Image: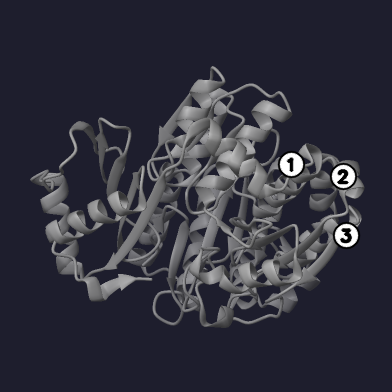
Amino acid sequence: MIHFGTGGWRAVIGDEFTRQNIQLLAKAMCRKMKEEQVEQEGIVIGYDRRFLSKEAVKWACEVFAAEQIHVLFVNRSSPTPLVMFYVEKHEMHYGMMVTASHNPAIYNGFKVFTYGGRDASEEQTRQIEAYAKEIEASGEPIARMEYEQAKEEGWVREFNPMNEYLDNIIANIDMQAIRDRGLHIVLDPMYGVSQIAMKTILSTARCEIDLIHEAHDTLFGRRLPAPSEGALSELCTYVREMECDLGIATDGDADRLGVVDDTGNYLHANEILMLLYYYLLKYKGWHGPAVRNVATTHMLDRMAEDFGEVCYEVPVGFKYISSKMQEVDAIIGGESSGGLTVRGHIHGKDGIYAASLLVEMVAVTGKKLSELMKEITDRYGTCWMEEKSYRFSAKRKEELKKLLFSDKLLPEFSDPIAKVSYLDGVKVYFQDGGWIIARFSGTEPLLRIFCEQSTREQAEEKCLRFASFLSLDATKEQR
């Protein structure tokens, strides 16, 4: 019942996300830590605002305590990157976060972090799954110690490392430049966990701050807590009507970023990556490659080549991005869903740090976001990415997998094809520089199709052609 995807273990609450499975996962983690002889240093665990998140930590704590493994419990809802930062800063081998990130409100789950504050690798998550399977098959009872007893005996210590995390970000951002600019910013935490951190950082930099959607709502306003264009319509309106310098949104656990420019225009995550890479290269004078996943803009490749650098492509999953960044000493890595990190910060996604760096960029350059985007498009041209997601049955998944990966059949495209890759899903590279990819989501039962072309019409046409070829039902498209 415990299966890790690209972003941790996620499951529907009450279906597979249950107290029994949570404690099974905790037992598997205990066994892994003992096998590796790192149990004496303990583990740090945090949680977000989802339904049952705090309770889930306590249920896990009961197992760790019974196994005599100390738990540092971040005792208030917190951003995922805070836990990653703590694991890295204090050289711990393991940390966990209760979250389902940007998934629908009926989901919850666990992310596992390893030494260096990284997302657990596929090899490590497979080991955890194997331990859980062995424990379940053996029928052995899972020992538990009541939470209050675990606290009294010192196996669980509640604490809040937020100040340490914020001080680290503040020390690495040009706060004086932001103070001098006097920016008016509106924040949209999407009912998630970023508002305290973002408000503290920007208030320290003397920004004028407005907040929307800051309440604790486990249904996330009945929307996906993902900073997509459709979900940020109110933020766009607010920026225009209140004449703000920019709008900033983060997903449910604050590891992904969404941005609205000074005109109220939504910036795609690809554009945020382009802006920050350009800023680091041109205005800060950094040198180094970029890393992106297979479903992220190739405009980064053009930019890297222009500055004498290289852009590397990896599978979807931030663990692949952070690993490649370390290997090639990249200065930025990111994905089209809004996650990114920068050299010198943690090895995972951090929407709070990325937002702070973006505000620094506006202050240091003295230019509005719309002006900076024009500077980039004037230099590198424009493109459009179309994204579509389709739900399917278990039977259809097997049919689609056979068609795409066994038979390796593709639609007939009008543009000449340069190559086809099966690194992650099936990706078609066209000779004109455009591309299209179809891949199964690692976090939800969805088939996703991404296409980047020079115009919206071309991208939409290719997406629909691919969907039609796969006989995907348009009524089951997730919007």
Find out whether the residues at labels 1 and 3 contact each other: C-beta distance under 8 Å.
Answer: no
For the N terminus, the image quarter is bottom left
Residue 12, visible in the rendered structure: yes
Nearest to the observer: residue 122 or residue 141: 122
Q: Which of marks 3 and 2 is nearer the N terminus?
A: 2
Specify whether 75 is left or right of 403: right
Mark 1 crowdedness (10 Å alpha carbons): few <14, some 14-19, many ≥20: many
Label drawn at residue 361: 1
Residue 27 drawn above or below residue 414: below
Find out whether the residues at labels 3 and 2 contact each other: C-beta distance under 8 Å.
Answer: no
**Which kind of residue does numbered mark 1 sit on?**
Met
Query: Between tags 2 and 1, which lies in front?
Result: 1
Q: Residue at x 90, y 55 (%)?
A: 204
Q: How many marks?
A: 3
Q: In which quarter of the image is residue 386?
A: bottom left
Q: Which of marks 1 and 3 is nearer the N terminus?
A: 3
Q: Mark 2 points at which residue?
A: 175
**Which kind of residue does numbered mark 3 sit on?**
Ser
Label drawn at residue 154: none
Q: Earlier in the sequence, mark 2 or mark 1?
A: 2
Residue located farthest toward the left when viewing the structure as drawn: 407
Which x, y percent locates residue 140? 42, 68
- Element at badge 1? helix
**Which kind of residue does numbered mark 2 sit on?**
Met
- Element at badge 2? helix
Q: In which quarter of the image is residue 387?
A: bottom left
Q: Mark 3 points at which residue?
A: 203
Which x, y percent locates residue 247? 69, 61
Tell me the distance, in whole angstroms, between the alpha carbons under discs 2 and 1: 11 Å
Q: Residue at x 77, y 38 (%)?
A: 365
